[in-house]
Image (cartoon, helix red, strand yellow):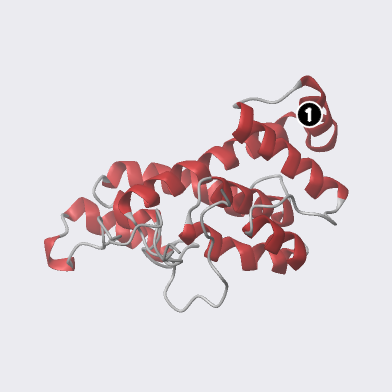
Amino acid sequence: MVDLHRTQQGYAHDAAERLPMPPMDQLSAEQRAAAQALIQGPRKGVYGPFLALLRSPILLERVASVGEYLRFASVLEPRIRELAACVAARHVSNQFEWVMHAPLAIQAGVSADAIEALRQGARPRGLAADEEQAFDFAHELFTTHGVSEATYRGALARWGEQGVVELTTLLGYFAMVSWLMNVARTPAPAGADRAGIDAFPQ
């Protein structure tokens, strides 16, 4: 039986972190400024994808700004945002975002049973109508790289044009930072009290 590392990306046996936090005395002025902006903002620290992004401080600042809006100020309510983050993390098998956002989704009102089903790679059941619509939109987008007219029209009727744009962009944002952490093998947060994700069943 394969020994799966739940706190590392890629399920590799030798999954050492590739882009950890650089030593503070080796940071450039631009890197220190980017790190300080994260510490002073709503994230309150440098972690997750921003560890790797420190290698490109201007990119870090711009990615952080997009993510800050999508996470904290989007027209979508937190329950939908957090569910979408979980769908993205599960789709690309990213431990950090899963362990970070699964509890936030439950706190926001998504059923714990639905989150557990998603963790196992199953279709969640018992979702509220808007949650199911968001899940279907996300699943279709990740599977086909677009959405059908019926799915688009349903999302448009529920969230409007701005909501559709923000949901699509949020899914892309979480896929992007998850891919970055998968490449960097960024570990899940230390001391996480929720199970990570395993490889999809074969």
Q: Where is residue 138 in the image (x, y as percent from the top left)?
A: 67, 39
Between residue 41 and residue 141, name the one nearer to us. 141
Q: Which amino acid does label 1 sit on?
A: Thr
Q: Quadrant of residue 195?
A: bottom right
Name the element at disc 1: helix
Residue under numbered circle 1: 151
176 is higher (above) or lower (below) than 2: above
Q: Position of residue 145 (x, y in %)?
A: 59, 27
125 is higher (above) or lower (below) than 106: above
Q: Where is residue 108 in the image (x, y as percent from the top left)?
A: 73, 64
Number of labelled discs? Answer: 1
Q: How crowded is mark 1: few (under 14 residues within 10 Å), some or many (20 or more)?
A: some
Horizontally, residue 121 falls left or right of residue 177, namely: right
Horizontally, residue 152 falls left or right of residue 91, namely: right
User: Which residue is found at the position 62% from the left and 32% from the top?
Assistant: 143
Q: Residue furthest top?
A: 149
User: Which residue is found at the position 17% from the left and 59% from the top?
Assistant: 27
Q: Quadrant of residue 119?
A: bottom right
Q: Which residue lies furthest to the front in this view?
A: 1
Quarter in which the N terminus is drawn: bottom left
Q: Is residue 183 in view from this perspective?
A: yes
Q: Where is residue 28 in the image (x, y as percent from the top left)?
A: 15, 54
Between residue 142 and residue 165, name the one nearer to us. 142
User: Which residue is found at the position 51% from the left and 54% from the top?
Assistant: 199
Horizontally, residue 117 falls left or right of residue 32, namely: right
Between residue 109 and residue 2, name the one nearer to us. 2
User: Which residue is found at the position 63% from the left and 68% from the top?
Assistant: 103
Q: Is residue 109 in view from this perspective?
A: no
Between residue 19 and residue 34, name the one nearer to us. 19
